[in-house]
Image (tube, rainbow, N blue to C red):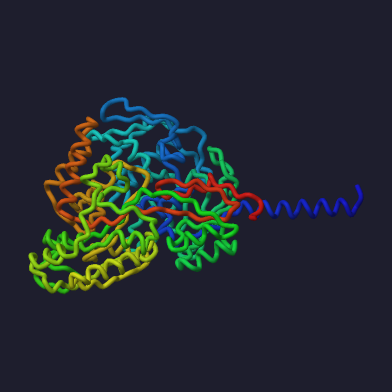
Amino acid sequence: MHRSLRHGLLASAVLLASGLAQAQTLRWASQGDPQTMDPHSQNESMTNMMNGQVYEGLVARDKKLNIVPSLATEWQQTAPLVWRFKLRPGVKFHDGTPFNADDVVYSIERGQSATSQINNYAKSVGTPKKIDDLTVEFHLSKPNPIFLEHMAAPLWILSKPWSEKHKVTRPLDFKNKEETYASMNANGTGPYMLVSRQPGIKTTYKRNPNWWNKHEGNVQEIVYTQISNDSTRLAALVSGEIDFVLDPAPRDVARLRNTAGVKVIDGPENRIVFIGMDQHRDELLHGSVKNKNPFKDLRVRQALYHAIDIETMKVKLMNNQSVPTGGLTPSPLGAFNDPAIEGRFPYDMAKAKQLMIDAGYPDGFEVTLDCPNNRYINDEEICVALASMWAQLKVKVRVNAMPRAVYFPKLEKFDTSMYMLGWGGAVTDAETTLTPVLRNNLGDGSGIGFYNYGRSKNDKFDAMAAATSVETDAKKREQLVKAALKEYKDNVHTLPLHRQMIPWAARSNVNVVHRADNWFEVHWVTINKSNP
């Protein structure tokens, strides 16, 4: 072959190889950052999703949220209170240690710890027992009508030997700022391996060459960068500096649709956003009223609800990227699409003002509304808009916005008088909202009411909700769920706002799968060689 031709072909091959290598690095961004690499410490969607690239459970979700085999190949309910799982043979953790039943038993027990935020789910699957190296049984103390849904929650499996070696057998206590080896390191069985972790800056992963499953996509390396500012994040995508954005600001979506080299991937999210109120203390921590708590008065809670102009918020603030609801569950399926539960109480400022007068607050009061500024779509802006609406009731609201890493530990300590919370995920059944979010907060490590940061107490509702957790007759359970949600809604223990719509944005050459739980699965991502 002629020397110059050979050199030309070699140069072309090098260019092609470098182009492919570059194409197989996925650079993506979001406004927030995972809170910890400890897979059981924080039950927060972004944290679960990032850890879910490294760790796996016994079951997983497919592109349509159906439950499919993962580290277990099959399962069956062998008795009303017993489930048996066959484990996948030949699986290895990233450090080379083999996966077996000991790791499953250890991981579920770790997830049931008091410092675990997934303990409600882990306890719901019962007591794990090793039968042999590749067989595990789960023994329940009471019926669980959605056992597999709980198993498909982020019940990630860790290596028992790795955890013991690095002294991380207990989930780290995030709210008290505990740091352990698991804060910055990970060792799972999943499609990607954690390479480096720089909180708030950059987190990188590389493809696991020994993964038991098949990669559908071609991403070899993941580089995640937290970009808090909406405009900066958008500019990085448009310039090609990054390939994918999980959370473009709603106001930017229309412009992105008309931007060359970029595409928008639309989809609804199973997530409800609401406002919670302290209904526990006799005097608010962060309020002006002395010796009593206005949020304990149903009329005050009703007044605040009736004063929310949700349609204006939807159109002006959310750019129609929201679905207003009076419901309490992430998906309307959780309430069986019951219009009595899904419908909102009307926007009625005159009625709201009269309720405030009737409650003895004609001149309102002052209160602080805690709000994240990098967790939900337009979270801080929503809080500011609500403050403006409630000012018409002479309720002076101070919006206290902060990053999620500071926000959630604050709520866990109940250091709040009024707060924003979003709740969602892959499960559409009401159970995973009723038990951890709405029920009476027992404070006993059971996980019941763990996310009821307002500590509302409604014993009638609580008894109905508890009954739904063990009722296996589908028709009876539907009636119980509806009755429980109706009782909670009528007592306005929270102020529901809307369900989020989630547009994703990507470079034109990046193909992703949009899931309704806003879960970005990288092993499904394909990056084509060039971007037009």
Q: Residue at x 75, y 54 (%)?
A: 14
Residue at 12 percent of width and 59 percent of height: 298
Is residue 384 left or right of 6 when viewed as pictured?
A: left
Which image quadrant for residue 126?
top left
Locate residue 88, reporting x and y percent.
47, 33
Find residue 357 and report its horizontal and vertical position in percent: 9, 68
Q: Is residue 454 left or right of residue 70?
A: left
Which residue is nearer to you in this view: 122 or 418? 418
Total of numbered circles in the picture?
Answer: 0
Instruction: Judge from the rendering whether residue 19 lies leftward or rightward of residue 113; answer left or right.
Output: right
Q: Residue at x 53, y 50 (%)?
A: 193
Residue 361 visible in the picture: yes
User: Residue 423, image x and y in percent?
Assistant: 32, 52
Judging depth in this view, the residue of 308 and 485 nearest the camera is 308
Q: In which quadrant of the rendered view does residue 178 lie?
A: bottom left
Looking at the image, which residue is at 44% across and 43% down?
Answer: 56
Q: Is residue 250 positioned above or below 444 on the image? A: below
State whether residue 157 is above or below residue 242.
above
* Quarter of the image that includes the C terminus: bottom right
Q: Give percent across and percent down for residue 315.
A: 36, 60
